[in-house]
Amino acid sequence: MKDILDTLAESPSYSTIHALLQKTDLATVLKGPGPFTFFAPDDEAFQRINLDNVVSDLGSLAALLDYHLVEEKYSAAEIAQKLELPTRSGKALTVQLEEGQQEIDNARYITTDIACSNGVIHSINNVFLPNFSGWYE
């Protein structure tokens, strides 16, 4: 079984998040033992934000990516029992039921519980933005 970073690298749907991870120390973290829960926006989700702003400031990019990582392993069913999930960034993701579907911050699941050797990936339809202005087109 592959780790989170290698699993993302193998899928053409995650080329953007994989490339962004390579610009920060989070790539090294996601090769580590974990356990982790990583919320991975697909490439389509990144089309809705201003990528130039994302990659121009590595500190903000690192903070953005850290906001997608929980340093514990949680299945989608376990997440459904939570109100918040603490992230590596120090900010918590909000978990709620919206229109009969579970929503994490501003995103919904595309695919859940992608098993990796060091945790789990949940594919999401939006990029989590921890109060960064100017990132949406």
Image (cartoon, rainbow, N blue to C red):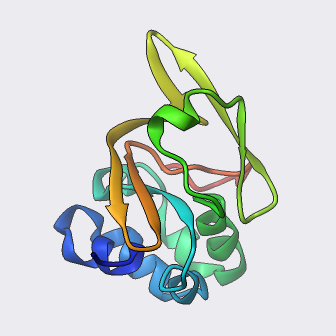
Q: Is residue 41 left or right of residue 95?
A: left
Q: How many marks?
A: 0
Q: Is residue 69 left or right of residue 4?
A: right
User: Where, by quadrant of the figure, is residue 18 drawn?
Assistant: bottom left
Residue 106 in sight from this viewpoint: no
Single out the residue that lies furthest toward the top: 99
**Residue 12 location, x and y as percent?**
18, 68
**Residue 99 location, x and y as percent?**
46, 10
User: Which quadrant: the N terminus?
Assistant: bottom left
Q: Is residue 23 above or below residue 128?
A: below
* Residue nearest the observer in this picture, 18 or 6: 6
Q: Is residue 81 left or right of residue 13?
A: right
User: In the image, what residue occupies the spot 76% across and 46% down?
Assistant: 92
Single out the residue that lies furthest toward the right: 90
User: Where, by quadrant of the figure, is residue 2 drawn?
Assistant: bottom left
Residue 128 in sight from this viewpoint: yes
User: In the image, what residue occupies the spot 47% across and 54% down?
Assistant: 49
**Residue 72 location, x and y as percent?**
63, 59
User: In the image, what residue occupies the spot 57% across and 36% down?
Assistant: 79
Q: Is residue 45 left or right of residue 91?
A: left
User: In the image, what residue occupies the spot 36% across and 67% down?
Assistant: 116
